[in-house]
């Protein structure tokens, strides 16, 4: 979370004083945010949820994904992406990332099997997937695409807002996201049938409170409904989002430009002008160089981000994906033909060991950015050698 001030306090106080804390009230803050966010993304429907994990799960429910199905997930994403697949009774199949630190479209293409029904490309750490190639793979194999934009709120790809490119999109608004209400999430789509199923998955009484017939009911994932407090905070946060994203994009471009002649190799960007810009990423030839660079700059080696690495997904490794054995997707007869094992030494691990994240911040002043650039240059000279200080055009002279 970057910013929160008296405006959020005032909006929450207004709800408390009104006594209208339930989201299904006239003038609902949740409904107002859903309409605003859908319009911003260019989709028809948006449903708030209690978390990003709830959003991913509801999105899969909407598409009818379940036992007997495989879903491709990248080897670098928060574990919730795979947990959502297990929550609906399906099996997550792990796919390598490429040098952009997002799902490798070629690896996804190779990994599709006869049971594969969907894929979840994840826009990680503010950078975006190569959605043009991802959607091409999906069309080739007739797969659904659940766009996981939980870590890239406010970003876009080649002019299109994230979450609106796949068949259905999911967002997180927890404490660590660009736009936050502490917890919370959202599902977006332009297909009414899917939106209706999302609403039922999030709130089994949605049809009742919204005055619709009960024909859309019949299943329920209770406890995922958002509160008016979350909606109120998000309406304030949404007003700030564009300015913060613009600031971080400018900072990232300034840092990349200023360090272009250092010998550092930035991670490949699939849509630099449209991503969030919340992190600058550099990839090194050796793991030791990445570690030293991270220590000198205050960055972090991506392999050290814990549950964002597939080798740290305990439920997947242990094949224990439910609170009761009878509900465990790994032992369901419907999933007998699904692939359940995966390589513990995938290419992804090598990329993550050699890549460093350096964070920007929308509240950085010009002096802060300059100081960060100076640290990066100094670290590059130390890690890569003094040759990195040679101006562009004179390398090797």
Image (cartoon, rainbow, N blue to C red):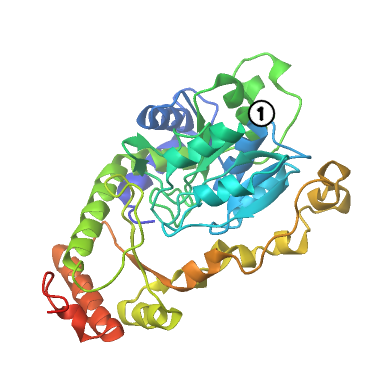
User: Viewer-proximal residue, 394 or 356?
Assistant: 394
Q: Is residue 385 positioned above or below 158 on the image?
A: below
User: Viewer-proximal residue, 160 or 231?
Assistant: 160
Please name the residue that numbered disc 1 is placed on: 200
Residue 365 falls left or right of residue 170: left
The answer to whether residue 181 shows anywhere in this view is: yes
Residue 83 in the image: state x and y as whole percent.
66, 52
Residue at 26% over, 86% down? 382
User: Viewer-proximal residue, 72 or 218?
Assistant: 72
Residue at 14% over, 68% down? 367
Residue 60 in the image: state x and y as whole percent.
64, 37
Residue 118 falls left or right of residue 150: right
The answer to whether residue 214 shows anywhere in this view is: no
Examine the image and state in which quarter residue 77 appears: bottom right
Residue 178 in the image: state x and y as whole percent.
38, 51
Examine the image and state in which quarter residue 204 appears: top right
Q: Quadrant of the C terminus?
A: bottom left
Examine the image and state in which quarter residue 282 appears: bottom left
Residue 49 falls left or right of residue 354: right
Residue at 38% over, 37% down? 235
Disc 1 element: helix
């Amino acid at each position: 979370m970057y910013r929160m001030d008296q405006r959020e306090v005032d909006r929450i106080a207004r709800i408390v004083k009104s006594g209208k804390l339930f989201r299904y009230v006239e003038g609902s803050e949740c409904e107002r945010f859903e309409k605003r966010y859908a319009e911003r993304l260019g989709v028809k429907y948006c449903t708030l949820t209690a978390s990003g994990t709830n959003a991913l799960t509801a999105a899969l429910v909407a598409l009818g994904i379940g036992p007997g199905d495989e879903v491709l997930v990248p080897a670098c994403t928060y574990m919730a992406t795979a947990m959502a697949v297990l929550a609906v009774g399906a099996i997550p199949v792990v796919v390598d990332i490429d040098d952009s630190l997002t799902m490798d479209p070629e690896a996804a293409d190779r990994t599709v099997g006869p049971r594969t029904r969907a894929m979840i490309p994840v826009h990680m750490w503010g950078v975006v997937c190569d959605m043009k190639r991802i959607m091409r793979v999906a069309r080739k194999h007739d797969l659904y695409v659940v766009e996981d934009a939980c870590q890239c709120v406010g970003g876009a790809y080649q002019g299109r807002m994230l979450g609106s490119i796949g068949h259905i999109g999911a967002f997180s608004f927890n404490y660590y996201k660009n736009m936050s209400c502490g917890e919370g999430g959202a599902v977006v789509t332009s297909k009414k049938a899917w939106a209706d199923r999302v609403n039922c998955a999030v709130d089994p009484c949605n049809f009742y409170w919204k005055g619709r017939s009960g024909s859309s009911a019949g299943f329920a994932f209770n406890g995922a409904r958002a509160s008016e407090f979350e909606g109120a905070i998000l309406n304030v946060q949404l007003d700030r989002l564009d300015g913060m994203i613009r600031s971080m994009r400018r900072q990232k471009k300034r840092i990349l430009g200023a360090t272009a002649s250092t010998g550092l190799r930035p991670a490949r960007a699939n849509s630099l002008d449209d991503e969030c810009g919340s992190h600058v990423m550099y990839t090194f030839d050796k793991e030791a160089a990445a570690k030293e660079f991270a220590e000198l700059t205050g960055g972090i080696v991506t392999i050290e981000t814990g549950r964002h690495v597939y080798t740290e997904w305990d439920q997947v490794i242990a094949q224990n994906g439910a609170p009761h054995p009878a509900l465990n997707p790994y032992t369901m007869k419907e999933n007998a033909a699904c692939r359940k094992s995966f390589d513990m030494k995938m290419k992804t691990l090598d990329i993550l060991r050699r890549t460093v994240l350096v964070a920007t911040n929308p509240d950085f002043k010009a002096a802060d950015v300059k100081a960060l650039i100076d640290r990066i240059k100094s670290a590059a000279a130390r890690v890569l050698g003094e040759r990195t200080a040679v101006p562009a055009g004179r390398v090797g002279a």
